[in-house]
Image: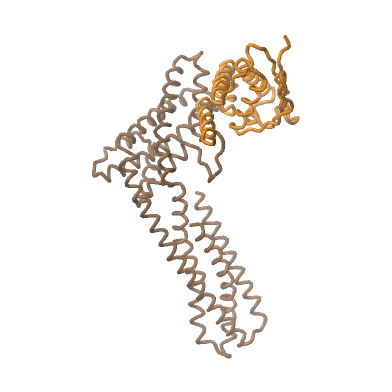
């Protein structure tokens, strides 16, 4: 049993090493100066999240496509990424959590908060769309985030919700 | 540079300690002490210094034994590494890849107008060059070991600064087992070094993070500059190949417990060197002074010898503290 668990852990680590995110701390100042590449970065985030979500789903043998699967995959991603989240609510139709850790926080202070906010929207939209497309589809969902950390007003709250039919 | 700073720091502490001792001795001088008290103090401190020197000598012999044991273990392993793990083909293949990577990033750094992007590429060039130099030194040692001539092909690819680093690192290697310092440097630069039992989840080195960021930047540029596609795929392939090759070396290095043995070796070497000389200066010298004074001490000479006896008495207290530190260091070997 322990052996099986260890194998899964190793496989997830390998998966994260293969599909890692570029360092936003480095990328964002470059894109900001270059004046282009935002959409391409969002596409990279979408592709990376899709590969990770599919990989984790397969490694953990998660078959259902629902909010619980999304929460589980998200939990694994944050644990292995060294981030901490605090779950607020998990039901059939809703998953919400708060976090004090996000790659956007690492982005240099030289970049103003409006620019950070724009990238935050871009990347959260790409990442959440990817997770919902992979883990909830054919059901539709929405994701909202309050950018509290970028605004400097505390924890950021993220809410995934299923769209009522 | 940090070594120099450390040395100055230690010398300053020693100077302050010596100054403090002199002040305390001067203060003690004011109070008159009887001949009997001085004799007792002198015999007690002499006995203390003698005991300390005895313990430190025993510690030194133990450390010397441990050092020789570790050195022979590492020397035996280093021959295997030069002969098998670091085959000629493997070193040449790694060096070719590092060289290609270096050339590509020098070109990229020259072509960009964005400071952050240039900084990213320059960081990669610096770290990659450091690994390149280490493998060049290893290749040089390997060729020497096999009695083959060094064509200096890799040296010809180095600029003057890099060549200086190469020469310096080559001169540092005095014993065969010291190649492990170079190999560990490579592995630590390539993979994120992890502390004992604490493995950060999904950790990668600064170099790998920068390489991945550069791949990402090149991918973002593809829509505008098609040549980025070729460079990106070349960098990605080189990165993957280098990862396979260096991971293999790293795996063997960890299997052989080299990252654990090297700090032990360093510790033993410090105790044999620096700590032993400190013991000689601060324990053996006052002991000798005491032994010289002891036969001369009489009621008439007591006042004359009083300040020296005060100094050596205070040094004996420092000696005991030093011994505790020494034992602590020995236990970590």
Q: Residue furthest right?
A: A153
Name the quadrant containing residue B95: top left
Number of callouts in the render? 0
Q: Quadrant of residue B26?
A: bottom right
The answer to whether residue A30 is visible is: no
Of B143 and A162, nearer the camera is A162
- How far from the left and from the top, in percent, is residue B119? 52, 30
Q: Residue at x 70, y 20 (%)?
A: A160
From the image, state the color of chain A: orange
Find the residue positioned furthest to the top: A165
Q: Using the rendered image of the protein, determine whether residue B327 is visible from the camera's viewpoint.
A: yes
Horizontal side of residue B107 vs A65, given as left or right: left
Whether A2 is drawn above or below A77: the answer is below
The residue drawn where x is 62% and y is 85% is: B37
> Is B288 left or right of B147, judged from the image as shown?
right
Q: Using the rendered view, name the quadrant where residue A83 is placed.
A: top right
Give the x, y percent position of residue B152.
29, 38
Please name whichever residue, A126 or B76, is drawn nearer the observer in this view of the structure: B76
In this view, B196 is above or below B25: above
Front in this rendered view, residue B118 or B147: B147
The colour with which the image depicts chain B is brown
């Amino acid at each position: 049993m322990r052996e099986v668990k260890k194998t899964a852990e190793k496989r997830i680590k390998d998966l994260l090493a293969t599909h890692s995110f570029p360092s936003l701390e480095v990328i964002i100042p470059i894109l900001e100066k270059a004046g282009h590449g935002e959409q391409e970065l969002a596409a990279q985030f979408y592709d990376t999240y899709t590969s990770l979500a599919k990989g984790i789903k397969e490694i953990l043998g998660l078959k259902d496509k629902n909010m619980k699967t999304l929460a589980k995959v998200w939990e694994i991603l944050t644990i292995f990424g060294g981030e901490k989240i605090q779950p607020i609510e998990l039901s059939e139709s809703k998953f919400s959590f708060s976090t004090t850790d996000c790659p956007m926080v690492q982005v240099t202070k030289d970049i103003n908060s409006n620019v950070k906010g724009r990238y935050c929207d871009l990347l959260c939209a790409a990442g959440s769309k990817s997770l919902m497309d992979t883990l909830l589809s054919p059901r539709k969902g929405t994701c909202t985030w309050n950018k509290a950390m970028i605004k400097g007003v505390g924890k950021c709250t993220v809410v995934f919700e299923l769209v009522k039919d | 540079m940090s070594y120099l700073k450390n040395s100055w720091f230690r010398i300053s502490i020693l100077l302050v300690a010596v100054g403090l001792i002199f002040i305390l001795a001067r203060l003690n001088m004011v109070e008159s002490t009887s001949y009997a008290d001085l004799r007792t103090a002198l015999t007690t401190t002499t006995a203390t210094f003698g005991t300390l020197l005895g313990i430190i000598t025993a510690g030194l012999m133990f450390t010397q034994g441990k050092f020789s044991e570790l050195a022979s273990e590492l020397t035996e392993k280093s021959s295997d590494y030069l002969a098998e793990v670091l085959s000629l083909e493997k070193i040449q293949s790694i060096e070719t890849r590092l060289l290609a990577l270096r050339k590509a990033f020098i070109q990229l750094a020259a072509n960009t107008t964005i400071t952050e992007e240039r900084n990213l590429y320059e960081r990669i060039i610096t770290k990659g060059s450091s690994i390149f130099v280490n493998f060049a030194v290893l290749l040089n040692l390997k060729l020497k070991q096999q009695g083959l001539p060094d064509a200096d092909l890799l040296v010809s690819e180095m600029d003057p600064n890099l060549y200086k680093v190469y020469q310096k690192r080559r001169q540092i290697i005095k014993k065969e087992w010291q190649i492990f310092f170079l190999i560990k440097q490579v592995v630590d630069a390539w993979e994120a070094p992890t502390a004992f039992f604490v493995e950060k989840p999904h950790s990668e080195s600064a170099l790998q993070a920068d390489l991945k960021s550069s791949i990402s930047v090149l991918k973002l540029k593809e829509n505008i500059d098609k040549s980025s596609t070729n460079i990106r795929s070349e960098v990605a392939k080189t990165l993957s190949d280098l990862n396979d090759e260096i991971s293999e070396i790293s795996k063997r290095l960890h299997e052989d417990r080299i990252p654990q043995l090297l700090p032990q070796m360093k510790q033993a070497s410090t105790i044999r060197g620096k700590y032993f000389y400190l013991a000689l200066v601060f324990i053996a010298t006052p002991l000798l002074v005491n032994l010289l004074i002891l036969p001369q001490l009489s009621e008439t000479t007591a006042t004359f010898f009083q300040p020296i006896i005060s100094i050596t008495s205070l040094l004996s207290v420092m000696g005991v503290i030093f011994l505790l530190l020494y034992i602590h260091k020995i236990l970590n070997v």
